[in-house]
Amino acid sequence: MQSTTRKIIFVKMSVICAALVIAVFGFIKYSDNYQRVSASAQGPTPSNTNAPGEANCTACHTSFPVNSGTGNVLISGVPANYLPNKSYPVTVTVNQESAVTFGFQITAVDSQGRTVGTATLPAGNPQRMQIVDGIVGPNTRRYVEHTIDGIVPTQFDTNSWTFTWNTPAQRVGKVTFYASGNGANSDGGPNGDYIYTTSKAALSGSAISNFDSDGLSDVAVYRPSNGVWYGLNSTNGSLYAAGFGTTGDKIVPGDYDGDGKTDPAVFRPSTGTWYLLQSTAGFASVSFGVSTDIPVAGDYDGDGKTDVAVFRPSNGVWYYLRSSNGSFDFVSFGNSTDKPVPADYDADGKTDFAVFRSSANSWFIQQSTAGFRSVQFGIGTDIPVQGDYDGDGKADVAVFRPSNGVWYRLGSTAGFSAIAFGQNGDKPAPADFDGDGQTDVAVFRSGNWYALKSSNNSFFAAAFGTAEDIPVPNAVLVSGN
């Protein structure tokens, strides 16, 4: 009897086509050379994950439409913002009541359809997972999938697999995890099985006003008159409000505890003190700086947490406090009239020291990995609006020109572009409002927000705030706080 049961399971799994994929969200043309699905208990055919340019396993499991059952496929362990040269354990779970066997497949690609990073499988004998290659359009994609020893669950109605995703040496913009999983009834054929798909994204730090950790920047303001932060959560449209600050404070929003959420924070010049309202780690205060310093919060040590930091115009020195080990450091870079424009210009996960020198119409950038560079870009009256406008993981040199309402951008991948958006008197508030990994052009005008979403070039407007308010993304630029 035992031998017969194993035979039935093997026959059944010979037609299972189950997949789970990690991929960067992007428009990828469907291949003109699709291969017919060939499923196997040894592992499904690659490129059937429901990612852009791919089918899913309903190609052979045709009893039910995709995602029509009572189960699901889940992805856990994906970081809200990934860092270069890091390893993250990622778990794939397929749930289906009364299913006997389960399968999956997984890969990672960038916006051009290229594989991102590598995968490491846990030691095991027999091995429950394997790595295979597949071709989608002009690119080769790498997939992690089940083996014949990984199809039978250890408990009823669910099965999970965990592997390690190793990120590349540099950020590449948004990475989206696409998933397709199979919960099979093991009746010896492809009928009666349920196929599920899902996706999950990891960003490269592009959501700079993200109070609900959904990967989208929120419309949010700070009101100096009452010291209250107001935000409109992009997850469900609910109102966020936190009283944190007082008259004279400079707001310094950032992710100080590394949980993927923006924390309300202020620098009080009168005392040289930082006050942090961390969403996970709670309240903290740090004495760091003097009254004439310009706060330049950023992740200077690349640990995924915002560091307390100031630029001192009187001597052109940057002082910062590493969150990774609490140590203090400083760098001489700039002069008294420079505007600090810190950002990650070389995609190594660390904020770089950078200034815009209006007298020379030039940017000077000390990249933590790629080294020093200077760029002549802009004029003296421009407002610097650095951000990742082309989605490659690198901050781009960019300015907003109030005199004509034009944004000029020098994309590290896309090159030069100019767009008329705004008018004199607007406060630039660029951020990733649509979660595509690219900074969106946006302005705040007397309590009204206007943005141009990069994902579909659509216009967005929202009445939120008053004329006195400071838009949170503007404060991150260190230009109008």
Image: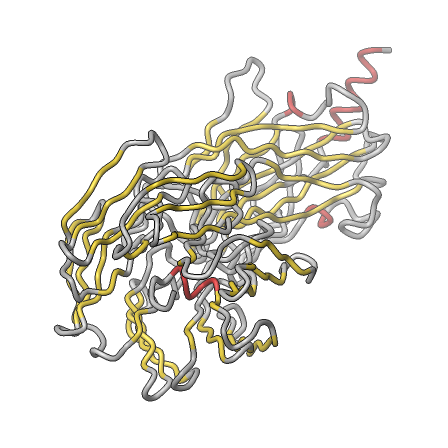
Residue 338 % position (x, y): 19, 65
Q: Nearer the viewer, residue 435 or 248?
A: 248
**Residue 18 on image: x %, y %:** 67, 39
What residue is shown at x 25% (from left), y 60% (from top)? 340
Q: Is residue 399 visible?
A: yes
Q: Which quadrant holds residue 458?
A: bottom right
In the depicted view, which residue is nearer to us: 52 or 215?
215
Q: Is residue 259 left or right of residue 76?
A: left
Give the residue drawn at x 42%, y 45%: 116
Residue ID at (20%, 78%): 380
At x 66% / y 48%, what residue is drawn?
Answer: 198
Residue 397 drawn at (x, y percent): 28, 66
Q: Nearer the viewer, residue 438 or 474?
A: 474
Question: From the viewer's perspective, is residue 477 above or below residue 262?
Answer: below
Q: Is residue 219 above or below residue 45?
A: below
Instruction: Locate the N terminus by quadrant.
Output: top right
